[in-house]
Image (cartoon, rainbow, N blue to C red):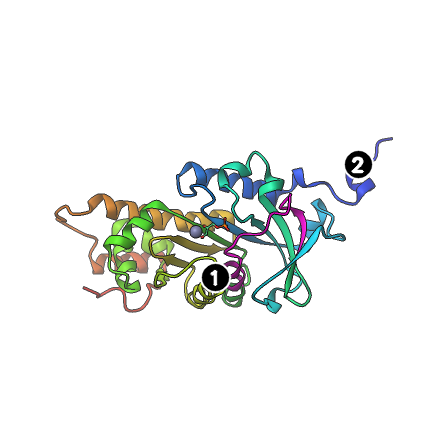
Amino acid sequence: MTTSLIETSGYIGSAEAPFIQEMTEITHHMWTLGWDELNGGNISYLLDEEEVGKYIDIHSSLRSLDLAFPVKELAGKYFIVTGSGKYFRNVIKDPEANLGVVRVSASGEQVEILWGLRNGARPTSELASHFMSHIERLKVDPKHRIVLHTHATNVIAMTFTHELDESKFTKTLWQMCTECLVVFPDGISILPWMVPGSNEIGRETAKKMKDYRVVIWPHHGIFGTGATMDETFGLIETVEKAAAVYNLIGGREIRQVITDSELADLAMAFGVEPKAGVLGLV
Ligand code: 13P
Ligand code: ZN
């Protein structure tokens, strides 16, 4: 009689973990889009303890790291995260070196590394923005799971030529493709340019996340959040597509647009509430 791996060790093993496969697939896909040059971009994905425990030994941690920003609200929560300085291009070749499964300690002052981040690697340098954003998004959406940051090319380009007013930026994006208003009726938010990797940009990003699922960092990239990888990636993909259309039009004469009354009809037909103060803007 053969005994299964789960009966002998108590868990199946990381190679089978769906959450590691999801991270591997999406980082590869994003790299192929050219959004994640070098080590650009990072992802954190909130996981269920029960799900993690099926695949990984959660009873012994490999090491702990101090957090410069306590996140008591996330105590005991599990995340899979990308490593700092790690290339999305390389995740598919070696997930264990480039990703990590971590648990926030009971005090909220450390993360315990349970799997991955081999050879002393650390979670993304944008962990403050990720964790603080998770805290805010969970308050407004209990199904929230993912924070995804990427250097989406057209979004970055658009932050050089478009006014950085959130309502005006949102309206332009809505006007670029008919589906945009339906996908992000809540609009997009924008921070002023800030030094990345700091607690301060983490706090400012999280403040925006109280009201928005998308935060643009001018001349740097975009943060998107959602309940699933498909939803989160799809949201960013849609903003990036609209930005690409805007950049393609750049400088040419515009002969017709989707009018405000057409946008209002669209919102009505799809049952979405457009962010207040955007329609009617000139
Ligand atoms: P990390 O490699 O530390 O995740 O940083 C990449 C990045 O995009 C910084 O904003
Ligand atoms: Zn970045």
Quadrant including the C terminus: bottom left
Residue name at image x 30 percent, y 59 percent: 170
Q: In the rendered view, does 251 fall on the left or right side of 131?
A: left
Relative vertical location of residue 92 with respect to residue 214 in this rendering, above or below = above
For the residue pair 38 and 269, the one nearer the viewer reads as 38
Give the residue type at disc 2.
Answer: Ser
Label 1 neighbour load within 10 Å: few <14, some 14-19, many 20+: some
Residue name at image x 33 percent, y 53 percent: 219
- Report if residue 193 lies within the magenta region: no
> As drawn, which residue projects farthest toward the right?
1
Q: Badge 1 is on which residue?
A: 198
The span shown in magenta is 112-134
Label 2 neighbour load within 10 Å: few <14, some 14-19, many 20+: few
Q: Badge 2 is on which residue?
A: 4
Where is residue 250 drawn, in percent x and y? 19, 47
Q: In the rendered view, does 124 fall on the left or right side of 258?
A: right
Where is residue 166 drawn, in percent x and y? 31, 63
Q: Secondary structure at mark 1?
A: loop
Q: Secondary structure at mark 2?
A: loop
Relative vertical location of residue 258 with respect to residue 105 in this rendering, above or below = above
- Report if residue 120 lies within the magenta region: yes
Where is residue 276 drawn, in percent x and y? 31, 68
Q: Which mark is residue 270?
A: none
Where is residue 67 drawn, in percent x and y? 60, 62
Q: Earlier in the sequence, mark 2 or mark 1?
A: 2
Give the residue type at disc 1.
Answer: Ser
